[in-house]
Image: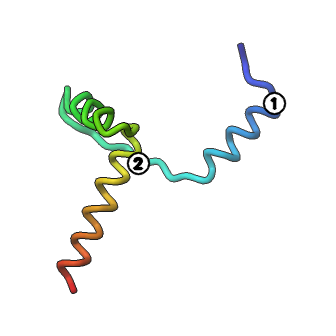
Amino acid sequence: MSLSKAQAVANKKYHDKFDDIKVRVPKGERQVWQDHAAGQNESLNGFIMRAVSETMERDLEKQE
């Protein structure tokens, strides 16, 4: 089933709000991260964003 023109426009508008980042990890590491995230009731994306944010906060505290 293909998307309607309106749905395609809505999808593009939604995706235009974000930047994409591609991360390469060794084979099997993605699954380790996904399992950990699931154990925290998070998506993989949510887990990665939290990990980066918390690390940045700690780094800034060290600088002060």
Residue 51 picture location, percent across and down: 29, 53
Residue at x 38%, y 39% (from the top left corner): 42
Disc 1 marks a residue whose amino acid type is Lys
Sooner in the amino-acid sequence: mark 2 or mark 1: 1
Q: Quadrant of residue 43?
A: top left
The residue positioned 31% from the left and 37% from the top of the image is 37
Q: Which mark is residue 5?
A: 1
Measure the alpha-carbon separation of dots 2 and 1. 27 Å
Q: Is residue 59 above or below residue 14?
A: below
| Element carrying mark 2 | loop
Screen quadrant of the N terminus = top right
| Image location of residue 3, percent across then percent down | 74, 23
**Callout 2 touching callout 1 (CB < 8 Å):** no
Three-letter amino acid code at disc 2? Ile
Question: Taking 40 as reference, is 17 left or right?
Answer: right
Relative vertical location of residue 56 with respect to residue 51 in this rendering, above or below: below
Residue 14 image point, x, y percent: 66, 45
Q: Residue at x 76, y 39 (%)?
A: 9
Residue 31 higher or lower than 64, as above or below: above
Residue 11 lies in what quarter of the image? top right
Q: Residue at x 28, y 34 (%)?
A: 39
Q: How many marks?
A: 2
- Would you say 29 lies left or right of 17 here? left
> Can you give x and y, in whole percent of width and height, for residue 26 in the image?
18, 33
Disc number placed over residue 21 in the picture, else none: 2
Question: Is 21 on the left or on the right of 33, as rendered?
Answer: right
Q: Quadrant of residue 5?
A: top right
State the residue lying farthest toward the top.
Answer: 1
